[in-house]
Image (tube, helix red, strand yellow):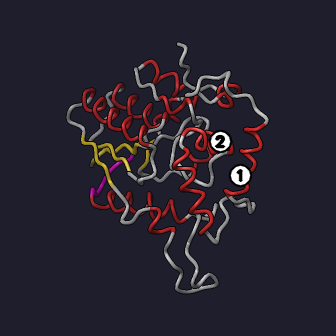
Amino acid sequence: MQYIASFSGGKDSTAMILKVIELGLPLDRIVFCDTGLEFGEQRNIIRIAERKFKELKPNVEFNWIKPEKTFEEYFYTVNNTGKRKGQIWGWPFMIGAWCNSRLKLKPLNKYFKQVGDHKRYVGIAADEPERYKRLKSNCIAPLYLLGMNECSCLNYIKEKGFRNPMYWKFERLGCYLCPKQSLNSLRSLRRHYPDLWNKMLRMDRDSPVTFKADGTTLEELEKKFKYEDMNTVTNYYPVLVEPRLFASTKQISIFD
């Protein structure tokens, strides 16, 4: 029986692994699924986390796994049957998103099958009861069982020296082009990563599926954000920090 921690690079899974190590719980492997859609800085942070985890628990394995194809390869796959025959896949639908099944679940399930009998640690926080209810029988949620919510996870990783400056820009971390992310996240993406934003705009023009489930395209969001830029004073704030995040949420502070 092996014990494996699923690691995303975000605050919850980082706090979970640190707690597992701190409490002396069994841990044989840490697995990270590299979708190819992480920000460059986040990939560096994951490498740093890998090194620090191994310093805290030298015998733990850190496994990087990848999907069979890239997001773009799936995005431009042409449908051969059905109502959308001849069209490319384009943006994933909000429900039953192909990106989650192809880029994460499929490679992870293949990995877990190869490992064999195991227990799996997952980073479900105490304020995610619905996710906890859906846990499989071989999964363990240390954060939930310890009563650690998202805020306490942020404070805990700060105490342990795991500061992630990506939280100065985003409330949540994940695939940079995810249609499910909030408008504030997209505003931050557009501001800090214009090359990635322009790439998404080009893909949006090719997609038969709108970016948002309500029919909103990225082109429409671009017009909205441009209008906001014309009517907003932003020079007051530090360039690297998103004022919208700090005005309403508890993110990692750069001042303490």
Q: Residue at x 72, y 45 (%)?
A: 226
Q: For the point 30% across and 31% down, which residue is it?
A: 53
Q: In the rendering, which numbered label is found on residue 169? A: none
Circle 1: is it few (<14), some (14-19), or many (20+) Cα within 10 Å? some
Q: Residue 213's quadrant in the figure?
A: bottom right
Image-quadrant location for residue 29: top left
Tell me how many marks there are. 2
Rendered position, 169 above or below 89? above
Tag 2 or tag 1, which sits nearer the N-term?
A: 2
Residue extending farthest to the top is 256
Image-based side of 84 in relation to 44, left or right: right
Q: Position of residue 55 (x, y in %)?
A: 25, 27
Residue underneath mark 2: 187
Q: Relative to residue 29, is residue 71 drawn left or right?
A: right
Furthest residue in direction left, as rendered: 59
Q: Is residue 118 magenta?
A: yes
Residue appearing at x 58%, y 64% in the figure: 92
Q: Are marks 1 and 2 in contact (CB under 8 Å)?
A: no
Q: Residue at x 45, y 47 (%)?
A: 38
Label 2 neighbour load within 10 Å: few <14, some 14-19, many 20+: many
Residue 250 x, y percent position in the rendering: 62, 25
Q: Amino acid at mark 1?
A: Leu
- How far across and how far down the image is residue 159, in percent? 45, 18
Q: Which mark is residue 221?
A: 1
Q: CA distance from mark 1 to mark 2?
A: 9 Å
Q: Secondary structure at mark 2?
A: helix
Span of residues in magenta: 115-121
Residue 172 is a magenta residue: no
